[in-house]
């Protein structure tokens, strides 16, 4: 089992999850505004299952979706991190970068700060050649964040998410990519 990685930014600690993160995680996953680009809000039990999957990623890979902790308050505010894509798609195998923050921490630059740290870790410490991210066409905030961290939309890679039924309003996804070479050039 690889050793787990912990990351620091000026305002954030990206760390392994603790049991006391789960209540705040469940509250965030139950917020309709936070979850508007997902099929549904999660119950506390569903949220706990997601936390367990995240822990399993750390156990298997040594990385995953890190819990975000504000250094100034010690508060859990969400997650950001890297995870192997677990569904079949033409761009796989791939490692994705993703994030989710509690609404009270939006529009403060925290997601991009954490995402930049996760990308740096992926390219330098983990040796990834490329990182992908994807979202629905309506999720303009995530698309702006992807662009802000140097990712580029790959229209040829756009896809229908296989976990969502034909005709589901969120099925279509846009694919963004960032190669290590492009990341190094943009630093």
Image (cartoon, helix red, strand yellow):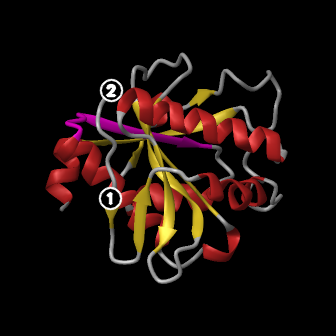
Does residue 165 appear anywhere in the picture? yes
Please give left or right for residue 10 compared with residue 172 in the image. left
For residue 80, above or below residue 136? below
* Dot 2 alpha-carbon crowd within 10 angstroms: few under 14, some 14 to 19, many 20 or more: few
Whether tag 2 and tag 1 are in contact, CB under 8 A, the answer is no
Left or right of residue 24, residue 52 in this image: left
Left or right, 46 with respect to 61, comes to right
Q: Secondary structure at mark 1?
A: strand
Residue 122 on the magenta span:
no
> Is the residue marked by circle 1 packed among few (<14), some (14-19), or many (20+) residues within 10 Å?
some
Label 2 or label 1, whichever lies nearer to me, is: 2
Q: Which mark is residue 124?
A: none
At 56% from the left edge and 53% from the top edge, which residue is drawn? 18
Q: Which residues are magenta?
A: 126-135
The residue singled out by tag 1 in the image is 7
Q: Position of residue 138 (x, y in %)?
A: 69, 52
For the residue labelled by badge 2, is the local secondary structure a helix, a strand or a loop? loop
Q: Residue at x 43, y 36 (%)?
A: 58
Residue nearest the viewer, comparing 25 with 180 = 25
Q: Looking at the image, which residue is at 62% across and 36% down?
A: 52
The picture quadrant where one finds residue 164 is top right
Quadrant in the picture for residue 7 = bottom left
Most extreme residue toward the front is: 19
Question: Up-down: is 38 above or below 114?
Answer: above
Is residue 167 placed above or below 136 in the rendered structure? above
Residue hosting label 2: 1
Residue 42 visible to an observer of this rendering: no
* CA distance separating discs 2 and 1: 19 Å
Q: Is residue 134 magenta?
A: yes
Q: Earlier in the sequence, mark 2 or mark 1?
A: 2
Please name the residue shown 54% across and 16% down the image. 88
């Amino acid at each position: 089992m690889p050793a787990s990685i912990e990351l620091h930014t000026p305002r954030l600690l990206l760390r392994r999850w603790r049991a006391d993160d789960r209540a705040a995680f469940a509250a965030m996953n139950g917020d309709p505004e936070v979850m508007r680009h997902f099929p549904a809000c999660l119950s506390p039990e569903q949220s706990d299952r997601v936390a367990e999957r995240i822990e399993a990623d750390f156990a298997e890979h040594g990385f995953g979706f890190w819990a975000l902790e504000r250094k100034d308050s010690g508060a859990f505010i969400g997650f950001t991190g890297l995870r192997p894509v677990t569904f079949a798609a033409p761009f796989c195998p791939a490692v994705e970068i993703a994030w989710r923050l509690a609404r009270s921490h939006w529009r403060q630059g925290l997601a991009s700060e954490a995402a930049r740290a996760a990308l740096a870790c992926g390219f330098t410490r983990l040796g990834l050649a490329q990182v992908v991210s994807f979202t629905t066409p309506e999720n303009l905030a995530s698309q702006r964040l992807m662009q802000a961290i140097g990712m580029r939309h790959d229209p040829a890679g756009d896809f229908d998410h296989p976990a969502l039924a034909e005709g589901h309003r969120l099925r279509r996804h846009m694919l963004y990519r960032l190669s290590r070479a492009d990341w190094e050039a943009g630093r």
